[in-house]
Structures are given as C-alpha cells and as structure tokens.
Amino acid sequence: MDIILQAVINGLLLGGIYAVVALGFSLVWGVMNVINVSHGAFVMLGAFATYWLFVLFGLDPFVGAPLAMVALFVVGYAIQKYVINLVVRAPIYMTLILTFGLDLLIVNLGLIAWSADFRSVNTAYAGQGLVLGPLVIPYARAGTLLLALLASAALFAFMDRTRTGNAIRATRMDLEAAEGVGVRIDRIYALTFAIGAALAGLAGGLISATLPITPIMGLTYTGKAFVVTALGGLGNMGGALVGGIVLGLAETLGATVFGPGYQDAIGYVLLVLILVVRPAGLLGRAYYA
Amino acid sequence: MGPRSSFRSSSVALVLVLGLVLGACSQTGGSAPKPSGGAPQATAPAAPAQSGGAQQPSGGQQPSAGQTETLIVGAALPLTGDVAQEGKFQRDGYELWKDTVNAKGGIEAGGKRYQVDLRYLDYRSDTSTAVRLLERLITEDKAQFVFGPFGSGATVAASAVNEKYEIPMCSPSASSEEVYQKGYQYLFGILVPNSVVGNETLDAVAGAEPRPRTMAIISRNDLFPKAVANASKAAAEARGVEVVYFEEYPIGATDLSAPLLGAKAKNPDILMGTGYVNDLILMTKQAKEQRVNPRVFVQTAGPAYPAFTDALGADANYIVTPTWWAPEAKYTDNGKLFGSAADFAKQFQDKYGYAADYVSAASSACGAVLQSAIERAGSVDPKKVRDAMASTDLQSFYGNIKFNAQGQNVGTGVTMLQIQNAKQVAIAPAAAATGKLIYPTPEWDRR
C-alpha cells in the first residue's frame, strides 16, 4: 500500500513537471493554431539558461527559472515576429515543418555550444525531501508542482482580468471579429508565442532543478506536451494542469503496476484512448465558444 | 473545416510526424532525432603527413629501411548524443596511443616505419549510423584497420561490416559474450567478459558481514547493461543470494522512480543498477530522493568515471562498481610503450587534464594490441595482422592481453572500486586494493 501511495505522490509531482511544460504549448496551439514542435527546444534553452545562471552566478534554479522566463520571452517574441509569422495562416503542415526545422536548428546550435554532455544542477537541497513515515516528498519536485499551479493561476488571471489577456482570448474565439474591434492580431500572436516560450523556459528551469539536462532533451518533452494538451483539451487554461497531472499519475502508477518498461508507452496509449473517446480532451470544449 | 475535425487532423499529422521522427531515431542507444543533416566530425581525407610516403603501403613499393608510410586507422565514435562522454573517452585513448607511438618513430614492420593516421566519424550515439559510417571509413577513407564504437550494442552491429571487408577491429568497450559469438574472425575485444564481471562483483560483496541474502536488479534495456545484469543474477544465485526484483527501464528514460520504488518494496540487501553513466547519475539522484537504502548499492559502467563523482559529489559515496582497469593495478609493459598502469594514468592526465578510466585505457590498449600484431606479423596485410592479433599474449599497462577463441580478452580479471569521500578507491583484488569495502552503506538520512 505504501508503494502505491508513494507512486501516487511521485505521479502528482511528475505531473507538475508535465503540466508546466505543456502550459505554453497548449496556449500557442489554442490561440494561434500553431503546433510548436520546437517547444521542447525552448524548454531546453530555459534549462540551460538556468544551469548557467547557477554555475556562473550561484543563482538557485527557483530564482534562475523566472529569469530564464524573461529571456525566453524576448527570444520567443522575436522568433514569432520574424519566423513563425510567415506560416501562421498557412496549412497546418507548414507550421509543423517550420517548427520542426526550428527545433533542429536550436538543438544543433545547443550541441555546438554546449556539447551533448549531461549537466546537473546540484543544489544543497537536491534529493532532500519531507519524510512522512514511509513516504517521501522531495522538495525540488514539490516546488515544481507548486510553481506549475502558480503559473496556471497567473496565466488564468492574466487571460481573464487584463485587457491584453482578453484580446488574446478574443483572437482565439474569432479572428475576424477581433480584428474588427481593433485588436492588433500580429502583436497578439507575437505576445502569445512569447508567453508560450517564456512558460517553456520556466519549465526548463524547473526541470534543471531535478533532472540532468542535455541539448537533446527537448523532443521527449514536446511529445509529453502534445499528449498532455490532447488529454487536457484546448480552450481551457486548466487543461494543461489537469492533463499533466493525469499523465504523471498514469505513467507512474502504470510503471509500478505493469513494469517500468511501459512507462513511455502508457502516455501514447492514453493519447489514442482520449482521441477515440473524448477528442476534445477532459476539459476542452468541442467548439471554441 | 470545423475546429473539431481540424484538431483531429492536426493531431493525426503530429502523431505521424512524431512517429516518423521517433522511428528514425529509436535505435538501440539512439536518442538524437537528427536523421541526416549535420556535418559529421570527420577529418578531411588529407594527403599523408609524412615525407616520401605513399598513401597505401602495398606490394611493389621500394622497401628501403627508414622509409615512412602512413597507416590509416578508422573509428566511428559517438561524439555527440546519449553516450557522448564514453565516445570522448575512447577518442582520447586512441589519440594518446597515436601520439605516443608516432613520437617513438611509428610502428615498425617489414623494414618500413608507419606513422599512424586516425580518422573519426561521429555517429551521434545512433547504432545504425555507426554501421553506416564504419563502412564509409573502410570504403572511402581506406582505413586499413578499425577501432570499435562504444558499447556492446553498437559493436555487435558494426562488427558485421569490418568482417565483410576482412578488416580487423579492436573493440575497447564491448564486454558482452553475445558480441563475440557470431563466429567472426576479425573482431577482438579488450574488455574481459561479463561473466567475469558478474562473478568478481558478487565475490566482492556477497562475503561481507552481515551476509547479504537478497538482491534487486534495475537494468537498462540495452545489450551490455542487460547482459551484465543477467551475468550478475547468475553469479548471485550461485552464491546463495536470492534475486527478488529484476526490471528493465527504457533507453532514454527520464524518470526511474518506479523501478526504484519497486525495488525498495522488496527491501533488498544488494541493489544493483546497470546502465551507462547518465542513467546511473539519474538513478543515484532518485535513489536519494526516494530514500532507497540497500546495504550496498552496486552499479556498472558509470561510477568508475570521474564525471560520475563530479556530477554527484558526496551522493556517490559507498557505491561499488567493477572496472576493467584501474591506475592502482600492478600492470606494466616494462617501458615498451606506456610503462605501468600508473604511468599511463599520469600521461593521460597530463595530456587531457582529466583522469583516465577503463574506457580510455582500453582504447589505448587497442592501439598497443594493433601495434604488437603488426610488428609480429611483419606487415600491414589485414589477414596476416588478424592472425597475429589472434595469437596475442601481451604484457601491457592494461594487464595481460590474451584473446580466447572468440576473440575476447581473458588475460586478466576486473578491479572492484568503491566511491569513498567522492573518490574511487580500489577494494579488490588484494594486490591492487588501496582500501576496504565499507559495508553496510549508511542510510541517506544518516550521512
């Protein structure tokens, strides 16, 4: 029983990582209909930014990750304005191809700059956790889950309460109508992509606190982000959070019950199931109302 | 197209793209999804560096004493990707041998001297690329001999190529017996078999008091890690230790908490983890997180590298690992090439600024074996050199090297190390030991 409980805890914490990775991905997809295959590369950039801040300036990753967010915001804005913008109204395959190429470019630049060696951020509290009898809650992962919740809440507040956030939602609902009421679509798109990249950077920074990082780490996370978004559904800010937690739990419990060899397969089985049973996702709306 | 069906079609599209990409890259040990594209790190096929030498030493040359020719040796290496660290160790080992032997005047055979020219291509830790690039080294770069890629998985695949072209290959990083059981005549391996590793590992820990009774094994789903896990399981059972948990994790796993939890549930005395250095760093970190407290934590092919202790610091302490070579070992070639094991370690450290481990040592040893075979054969004809390699009985800084009928080295045993105070300490065999096994391992909360 202890094992199942610990697996549940581990699953929730892993879900926190997945949720924060998927948050930006789902935002960009929902608003701009752009499936950003290079999302994992932005996660990687955020991870390395946080790593270098730690190594060069001694900044804790939970401090460095927000700084990485800012850096990735700027990078994302520039990339959208000059690159992604070219294919925003083009067929979906064009965005896939373009973002795939972008991923190749970013990852290989990373390999040239930092080599394929794995790096670790070794904080003093790495591996420490809250011990409750036979159960352990590692601090770093708990912090990640907390920040995932905070980021989701902040994003929701931004989208709901601010003028710019409303403009983004308007763009998502009806492009022409938003244009008609004076929303600057090009700026909104650049802003949305930048927020997506910033969230990816945050995710990367948090990941660097718990796992070793390498320039080729990104593709796994893009895959997870895709599954989480499909699970949670588009058009709803809570979707990434719910989807992430569900995936984390499913993977960890599944690995405990069926064996670790099936861990990655479980996510993709879930993806197929959700597409068959409830294609809009757990929280998604079938129609962007 | 309504939103619902465009979601579906974009999902299908992405699944297809992901499937293509993952299919292209999910080979054994592969993780970098870069099909074609990036420029491989190859030295351009250049003119021979030495004066008066023809590119291909063959019959019909005027064999005057002192004439210098070039010997091209090729190696496909994982210079980027999942096992890039190990690829670097191999390259540095090959290079040190090349520089040492060239500085001593080159290899002498049949009245000629050969300066060694090493050619590398980066296979990005993807096995199928390794096979392709090895073929290229032989057919386009005209490599006369080849050194192996990293690991049993890549070696067993690549060895089919050099066998086809009848070019001898020396492998410094394949210890699984399966690699040598295909009946190939042109493959030689420096690392002693996994069965030796399994037996000596269990000998080092099974006798400690209080005697361990149970063992859990977490293995990477890859050729060498699985093979050495199985060898250790057999060795454990032969010594009355019950294996209560045996699970595999996929290549490229980023979360090992599930198998660690499963092992913890069985409360094993010995926990064994197999994989490569990056997996084992992750495993150790998560073992600490999950508070997994075996009496002894054994790992293969990771803790012997300085990179392991650099990444983990004090968290690496108490881990026991077998290694195929250690600087403390009392091996020497009596000044012929490198000297003793300690001499080699110093030369390596001076040249590269980091400590040699068994992979880099075995790589230099491959060079020494090739050199010895060419000298004994008196020629660089691949068939003659192959025969000379098969009959190798060499004293070297790597110990006694003697190949069995399958081409695997059975000349020495392994050294057991334990990490103490974030440094590797040899604990067995007695002749090489500089410390003693600390057992049982203190619990994480009590360190």
Image: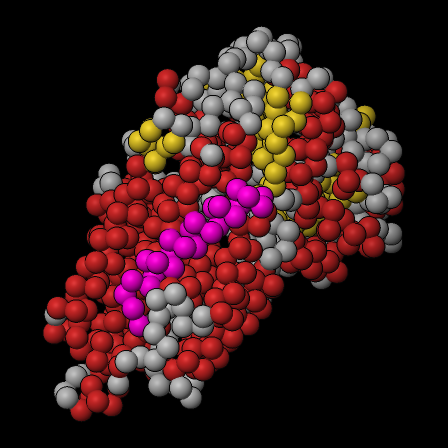
Image position of B265 (left or right of B375) = left
Q: How is the image coloured?
A: secondary structure
| x then y, percent, for residue A58 | 24, 38
**Is residue A250 shown in magenta?**
yes
| x then y, percent, for residue A164 | 15, 73
Q: In the rendered view, tell whether residue A107 sits above or below residue A166.
A: above
Residue lying at 45% horizontally and 63% vertically, measured from the top left? A227
Magenta portion: prevailing SS class: helix
| x then y, percent, for residue B447 | 37, 18
Frontmost residue, B361 versus B292: B292
Residue lying at 58% horizontally and 60% vertically, measured from the top left? B25
Image position of B342 (left or right of B223) = left
Frontmost residue, A194 versus B446: B446
Residue lying at 47% horizontally and 57% vertically, measured from the top left? A220
| x then y, percent, for residue B57 | 79, 51
**Where is the N terminus of chain B found, in terms of image quarters?**
bottom left
Instruction: Confirm whether residue B32 shows in the render.
Output: yes
**Is residue A241 shown in magenta?**
yes
Q: Quadrant of residue B328?
A: top right
Q: How many marks?
A: 0
Question: The magenta stretch spans which residues?
Answer: A235-259
Q: Quadrant of residue B136?
A: bottom right
**Furthest residue to the front?**
A1
Q: In the rendered view, tell whether residue B421 sits above or below residue A224.
A: above
Image position of B270 (left or right of B390) = left
Frontmost residue, B137 versus B238: B238
Residue lying at 25% horizontally and 66% vertically, measured from the top left? A195
Instruction: Confirm whether residue B67 shows in the render.
Output: no
